[in-house]
Image: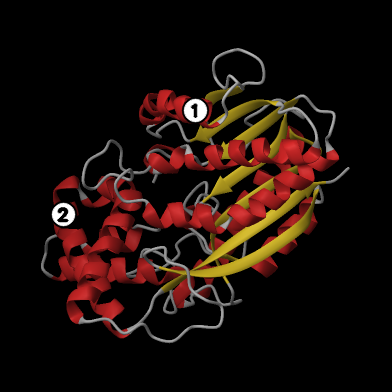
Amino acid sequence: MEVMRVLHMNKGNGETSYAKNSTAQSNIISLGRRVMDEALKKLMMSNSEISSIGIADLGCSSGPNSLLSISNIVDTIHNLCPDLDRPVPELRVSLNDLPSNDFNYICASLPEFYDRVNNNKEGLGFGRGGGESCFVSAVPGSFYGRLFPRRSLHFVHSSSSLHWLSQVPCREAEKEDRTIKADLENMGKIYISKTSPKSAHKAYALQFQTDFLVFLRSRSEELVPGGRMVLSFLGRRSLDPTTEESCYQWELLAQALMSMAKEGIIEEEKIDAFNAPYYAASSEELKMVIEKEGSFSIDRLEISPIDWEGGSISEESYDLVIRSKPEALASGRRVSNTIRAVVEPMLEPTFGENVMDELFERYAKIVGEYFYVSSPRYAIVILSLVRTG
């Protein structure tokens, strides 16, 4: 799988598009808003003389969420300035994603974004070239590598992106660790599970550690000393990488694929060969890589639960949510549409475009049945880092 080519959300504005099926990701952005506002306040307080702030949103995707984070950042900075008794600085905003991302959708949304900002910030002239301004640009490329000039950024944001790996780990892991076999037999699965061999677990963990280390090293070059990052992504609370909160959405998708293989609709060998470029890291893994890289200190690290539809869950409440069968099936369909908008471009090259409707119909039913007997949850990591030195 060429991750750079297939890792993009469903484009456009159709019924299976990311634009129409990204409520869960929007809620994750909202979940991290408090930490982001806190980081921006500390940044502004420690850089009171700066007149131009470099901001990057990494993994911006497309659809309504692509400008939501930037809108929040602009609002927060504007609201902070009167309290800090300082003028609003010039904002240099960079929206980043892989070259395969639907940047056309984002560019078409910019006029509305500028109008909203101008209406809300009367007299600031955002995007109009006058006075204090907000300049938005697109930066295609992988964030697992350098994207920006040295010390050009003050604030980096990323949401729902860092759980995606730079490559499928199972093919390349042995180059880094001789104890991992090249042929990782993960039969009937598309991600690590409780039945996967330990070599697969090790390969995935190693790939995440390698990628996250490169991410931190790249940002350490691009951020000014004292610059900040706020990152939110899917992770896990447990040391066990096969807990339900970290991987069960893939387990159920594998079940849907295997049901089609048993009926001869797809080949089982293709399921065995497919591995998702995804990893839900634990806080221990994150701390280990951050310490190893050495350029950042942790200001805040939180892990919060949300349900599969993106709804908030109290830390104290883990009881089963009682749903009727129709409610559970409706939830299953919504989750299926959300997952489809994200992973369909990865699946199509292996299994074929012609089976996608059938696959996600089955997946919706399986997820609905699971909602009827369980209350599935993701664990969302919210990580705030400071560039030291």
Secondary structure found at label 1: helix
Residue 266 can be seen, yes or no: no
**Mark linked to residue 236:** none
Residue 207 is left or right of residue 261, and the answer is: right
Q: Quadrant of the C terminus?
A: top right
Q: In the displayed structure, would residue 50 be above or below residue 220?
A: above
Residue at image position (72%, 43%) is 217
Residue 372 percent location from the top left of the image: 27, 81
Residue 348 percent location from the top left of the image: 26, 47
Residue 301 is left or right of residue 263, and the answer is: right
Comparing 94 with 184, the one in front is 94
Comparing 341 with 46, the one in front is 46
Residue at image position (31%, 51%) is 21
Secondary structure found at label 2: helix
Q: Give the residue number, with chain letter if any, for mark 1.
A: 119
Task: Say what amino acid the circle numbered 2 marks.
Answer: Asp
Q: In the displayed structure, would residue 274 be above or below residue 317?
A: above
Report how far apart the C-alphas of labels 2 and 1 lie in the structure. Answer: 42 Å
Q: In the displayed structure, would residue 169 be above or below residue 191?
A: above
Of the image marks 2 and 1, the number of the one nearer the N terminus? 1
Q: Give the residue number, with chain letter if any, for mark 2.
A: 357
Residue 354 percent location from the top left of the image: 14, 48
Residue at image position (77%, 24%) is 51
Residue 330 quadrant: bottom left
Residue at image position (84%, 41%) is 46
